[in-house]
Amino acid sequence: MNKMPETVRKELAALSAKPESEIDFSDLPATSEQDWKIAVRGKFYRPIKQQLTVRIDADVLEWLKNQGKGYQSRLNDILRSAMLDQMRHRSE
């Protein structure tokens, strides 16, 4: 499924193997606290979707569907939020 050319894959692998001390950051602009206040984590992250069959209580499914189109995306968002919340609590 990965459509990345082999040459790009090899170049990225070589770069990721380099220690940070060997990377030249001199051409990067400096950032400020203000820059990071508006930053959004994971904005371009698109996880791979996996099709599966699940059993959900009828009333829960009806509640999701009654909110309009996109009930599967809403369900995924709810589950992701619960997952991230649990991961945050475990790391504390």
Image: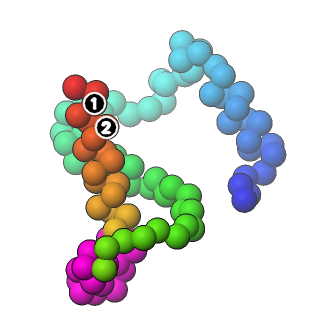
The quadrant in which residue 12 appears is: top right
List the residue tagged with mark 1. Answer: 90
Q: Where the C terminus falls, by quadrant?
A: top left
Does 63 appear in magenta?
yes
What is the chief secondary structure element of the magenta stretch?
helix
* Residue 14 on image: x %, y %: 71, 27
Residue shown at 46%/53% (left/top)?
45
Label 2–label 1 contact, CB within 8 A: yes
Q: Residue 81, relative to residue 19: is it above or below? A: below
Residue shown at 51%/55% (left/top)?
47
Instruction: Report crowding for label 2: few under 14, some 14 to 19, many 20 or more residues within 10 A (C-alpha).
Output: few
Residue shown at 74%/42% (left/top)?
9
List the residue tagged with mark 2. Answer: 87
* Residue 37 on image: x %, y %: 19, 42
Does 70 appear in magenta?
yes
Q: Dot 2: what SS?
A: helix
13 displayed left or right of 50 = right
State the residue in front, 30 or 4.
4
State the residue in front, 40 or 73.
73
Q: Residue 57, relative to residue 8: is it above or below? A: below
Q: Dot 1: what SS?
A: helix
Instruction: Report crowding for label 1: few under 14, some 14 to 19, many 20 or more residues within 10 A (C-alpha).
Output: few
Q: Is residue 6 visible?
A: yes
Q: CA distance from mark 2 to mark 1?
A: 5 Å
Magenta extent: 59-74
Tell me the colour scheme of the image: rainbow
Badge 2 amino acid: Met
Q: Where the N terminus falls, by quadrant?
A: bottom right
* Residue 23 on image: x %, y %: 56, 21
Badge 1 amino acid: Arg
As drawn, the label of residue 16 is none
